[in-house]
Amino acid sequence: ATEASTRAAAEARAEAEARAASEAKQRQAARAAWLEQQAKEGREARRRRAEQYEVKRRTAERQEAERGIAQAAAMEQARRHAAAKAIKHAAVNRLCRVAASRHEKEKADAAAAWQLRSAELERAAAAVRLRERLEGRAAALIRCTLAEWRADKLRTRTAAAAIARRYREMRARGELRAARMTLRRYGAAYLQRRLAAAAAARAASASAAAAELIASRTRAATFIAASERRRACKRLWAKVRRAVAVLQSNHAWRQLRKSAAGVICRAARRSLARRRLEGASARLQRAWRALRRRRQATRRRLAAHQMIAYAFRRRVACRLARRQLISLQSARQLSERKQAKRNQAAALVIGFAWRRALYARRAALQRRRVVLRERGAVTIQAMTRGFLERERCTLLCGSKSTFQFPRRLEECLIPFTVGEAKLTAKARADLAFVITALKADRTLKLRVLGCTQHTEASSIAMRRAKTA
């Protein structure tokens, strides 16, 4: 009976040990699964943070691009406004110059008519005295007319050369639109001056031919002294004869004025037609710009709607993931409660042997907590120095890298792999030092096995720890 009872006790002990070993294996497997789940959650959190950072970066880039587009549009609008203002001022100045030149021309025509009338009256009164005066006045008028024509020709050529040089410089710099606007702005005035100069040249040649004709007809009636026919005075007397003929031929002067007026009128008509065409092209450009602005506004609206839809989809996905996580946690808690019920039933069935093993396990855990408490103080002390090595702290494997300080330091617990460690007086003093050093934040970021939430790289910290 004693052997049978001994054998039964041994079998029961072996069965209990086997069951304890299987439960230890199950706990180890559950712990490995829990560690894997924690690692997976960490990876998922890092991925979510990376996605959030990417979304923020893209949003910032898009906002920067929109600000650049708006600034460029404002600058373009200001430039166009300045160009239109300059064109308007140039047109007003050109009209003022044309009106002033017309007024001056009318004044000159009136003065010339008055001079011609007075010359006719004087010629009727005293022919010899009139001829002498006419000779001097004609020479002066011819000199003034030739000088004005040469000056106008020189000014026209200089202005044309300046416009051409400016156009070439703008084309060389790549400012094609500004070059075209320069030609539009100065081309009409240059053409008008050029046509007027050509008409004046034609009229001068016609008046010269008429003067030659009149001089040839009146050569017999004009008394010329023998001394004036000499070779030395031939060129000067030809100018005098030409001036007298021009002043005597009112018809030639009238024809000259009429031809010049016709040329100027035709040039004005052409400039008006060109201005009408430019106005039509400007209206077409304004319509095209309005259409382009509408298209850009539509694109911006579509982009905003797409961003809103993307944010809504992300929110729905986050809600779904949160619900799945909650359901997974509730299922895990339910399985843990079921396992606890099974363990309690097994303990009731087994009896005192299982209870004794449970008491021994509790005593071992208590001793382990004491060891963890002592090592926890060492860990906090090392962290106040700014580093934490892998070999010296194997207890923090898989634990949280951040915890919130309670209101009282005596209630502070550090989570470890197995259980929790309450701080000793030394550790509380070290934590008080850390709190006074980090007054701006009540969260202490621990550095555990290469944790990325610290501000210092792990290689630099390890090197500083070894050299300290």
Image: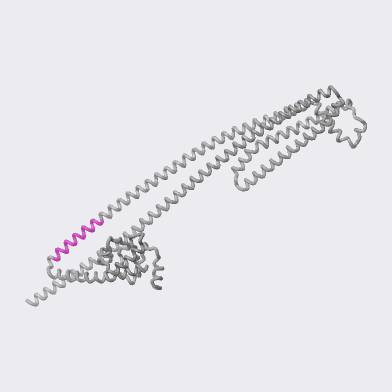
Q: Image quarter for residue 50? A: bottom left
406 relative position to 240: left or right: left
Q: How is the image coloured?
A: one colour
Residue 341 included in the magenta stretch of the image: yes
Magenta highlight on residue 241: no
Classify 361 as above or below 191: below
321 with respect to 89 (left or right): left
Give the quarter of the figure containing the C terminus.
bottom left
Residue at the farthest right position: 226
Q: Quarter of the image holding residue 442?
A: bottom left
Residue at horizontal 59 percent and vertical 36 percent from the top: 88
Residue 223: image x %, image y %?
90, 27
- In the current view of this chain or complex, which residue is farthest to the left? 1
- Identify which residue, 349 or 161, lies in the foreground: 161
Residue drawn at (49%, 38%) of the image: 291
Residue located at (65% from left, 45% from top) = 168
Please tell me whether residue 328 is drawn above or below residue 247 in the rendered image.
below
User: Which residue corresponds to the image point at 18% horizontal and 62% vertical from the top-left?
Assistant: 340
Main SS of residues in magenta:
helix
The quarter of the picture where the N terminus appears is bottom left
The picture places residue 199, in percent across and down from the top left corner, at 73, 32
Image: magenta residue range: 328-347
Residue farthest toward the front in the current orientation of the protein = 436
> Which corner quadrant of the image does residue 154 belong to?
top right
Q: Nearer the viewer, residue 328 or 46?
A: 46
Is 299 placed above or below 267 here? below
Looking at the picture, tell me which residue is in the foreground, 135 or 194: 135
Where residue 417 appears, as percent x and y from the top left, is 27, 66
